[in-house]
Image: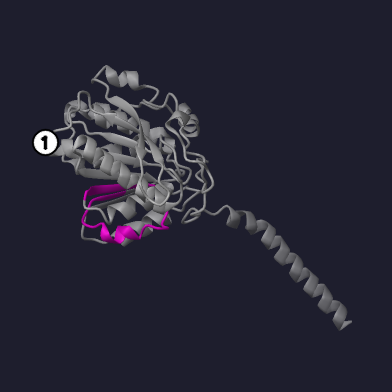
Amino acid sequence: QYMSRYRSILQSFLSAIKSDIRTFAPAVMAAPKTSLPATTSSTRSPAKISDYPSLFHPPAHAGLGKQKAICDVKPLTIKVIDGKDGAVPAFLHLPHNYQKEQSDTHERTAAILLSGAGGGVVGPSGIYLSIADKLASLSKGIPVMRLDYRFPARNQYCVADVKAAMDYLQNKYSVSRFVLTGWSFGGAPVFTVGGNDTRVIGCATVASQTAETDGLKHLSPTPLLLLHGTGDRTLSPSCSERLFRMYGTKGVRELKLFDGDDHALTQNAPKAEEMLCRFIMKCAGVEIGDGERKIIKEVLVGDGDRAELMKRGGDLKGEERID
């Protein structure tokens, strides 16, 4: 009798556990991560500039031309010398009639924009296309490079790509100061380079991971901007909160959390874009005047174009998601 009752109790207990597992397992599996695997896309062949046709300007760039002379865009293949060697594709947005020898400090500054674990050249919600056009088209515009990776999600090689791009801009255009911006995995090369190369004068990230970001500990007092959506299902917003703490209190830092937004900040893309534009130009020593503030606020990528642009630009080849 007692054994029968014991079995009955045990069966009820096990049934309850199985029910709980079925209930909570999906939520656990779907929980956002704090880092993307270092092996993501490691077998992908390096991209070529020809993989990205018709991605020179944002869809509505003609509207920008009504107010300013639109910048020049050059597709590039930058040679990288390291253990793997090879070349990395990039798009360089240059101010109209940009000259190698410049006199003003801001004109010796350039921004480099980096994507996530799958590589790519348009960034989260396609904002890199818009940022690059806008900043290179200002009256005191700066060069902006949208840089891919040879081997996405492998930080050692991505760091070499960034340094090769910096050297290219320095040798070709006498640029000596750089503002680095990265999305998702892109935070790893941004902080690795930013914390160890004195040419970097500012770092910004959108929904950064935390793996391989120890360089951030050496970044201060170089300015830092962190953006993240609290509804991010790819990388937890706790990543940016942790990075904010890692940076310390000796420099200028800002953390902006967008309530309920996703990994690519699709709900707040124009605001995120504006914040990044202002941060980059402030690091460059340029105050955007009243007459050009409307340029920074101009919507050059429509909401309906964002996901398609990311697919065409290679920005969704890794584990990044926009849902």
Specify whether 22 is left or right of 33: right
Q: Residue at x 46, y 43 (%)?
A: 262
- Residue 191 in view, yes or no: yes
Find residue 216 and report its image quarter: bottom left
Q: Amino acid at mark 1?
A: Asp
Compared with 115, 98 (above or below) is above
Give percent across and percent down for residue 110. Answer: 24, 39
Q: Residue at x 41, y 38 (%)?
A: 123
Compared with 278, 38 (above or below) is below
Specify whether 176 is left or right of 315: left
Q: Secondary structure at mark 1?
A: loop
Relative depth, front residue between 82 and 240: 82
- Residue 229 in view, yes or no: no
Q: Which residue is mark 1?
A: 104
- Specify the segment rendered in magenta: 199-225
Q: Is residue 210 magenta?
A: yes
